[in-house]
Amino acid sequence: MRIAVPNKGRLHEPTIDLLERAGLHLENGADRKLYADTVDPDVSVLFARAADIPEYVADGAADLGITGYDQVCEARVDNVEELLDLEFGRCRLVLAAPEDGELETVADMAGKTVATEFPNITADFFADAGIDPDIVEVTGATELTPHVEMADAIVDITSTGTTLKMNRLAVVDDVLSSSVRLFGRDDVLENPKVEEVRTALASVKQAEGKRYLMMNVPTAKLDDVRNVIPGLGGPTVMNIAGEDDGDDAAVAVHAVVNERDVFETITEVKNAGASDILVTEIERLVE
């Protein structure tokens, strides 16, 4: 099973970090120009340009790919399927035009020129709108094209909008929302290793923002403590070794809670009778 991942750029480090946290440690490092083995002898990693990864998967050079949804849409490959939204690398493709100009709606783009690094996505967007502008493909500095009279408007990626504002461009409409996704080729989706990889990556994402809460609770106070734990489902209650079943008996209570709830929860369970409270991070969570 070969996984294609970005070889550089803003998606490279987060992707490698995710693989490492999922247990797919790269044995010969992430600095190789082409590939790396992992601790799983059945899984290797192929390094490629983010824009090339959909084609690598579609053509069989890799079985799975990790790259932006925008790159998959632009590639127009029809034999790959999205398996998991990895929820990082979020951005938007937007239609933008010069501030204080006459282009204020999508309909205004009829007969105009639009510059973009994403000609296929742009063509599909305007086709859905019933508009047929002239689309010019550029390879960089898209936001400058309206100011040098190469285009009337652009379709480009934005995360915060700062670059658009710096270049006196205003968003006319959203074209596409994107994030990094795991996807695979149709003919390998039944391979059990695909589900292993998907589950491993999903378990890391599911653990983010969660904490594991452990405490001892007198049996008589158990219901009170349960009522104040905002867990993912009911807490786990276990007998404590060596505890008698008398009036002072206690049990161990474990629960997964959202990180943002930990501060208040500790106070509430303590007031409800819990003691020996321990909070730990969760590396992976398989639901």
Image (cartoon, helix red, strand yellow):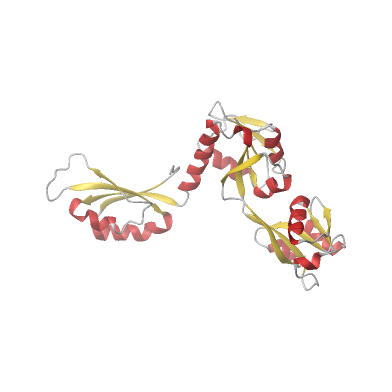
For residue 172, which quarter of the picture? bottom right
Q: Residue at x 53, y 39 (%)?
A: 198
- Where is residue 164 drawn, in percent x and y? 73, 63
Q: Nearer the viewer, residue 28 or 200?
A: 200
- Horizontally, residue 91 falls left or right of residue 268, namely right
Q: Quadrant of the N terminus?
A: top right
For residue 269, which quarter of the picture? bottom left
Q: Residue at x 20, y 52 (%)?
A: 218
- Horizontally, residue 234 falls left or right of residue 161, namely left
Q: Is residue 272 visible?
A: yes
- Horizontally, residue 239 falls left or right of residue 180, namely left
- Where is residue 286 drawn, in percent x and y? 44, 42
Q: Residue at x 21, y 55 (%)?
A: 221
Q: Nearer the viewer, residue 67 or 82?
A: 82
- Where is residue 242 drawn, in percent x and y? 17, 39
Residue farthest left in this picture: 246
- Where is residue 122 drawn, in percent x and y? 76, 55
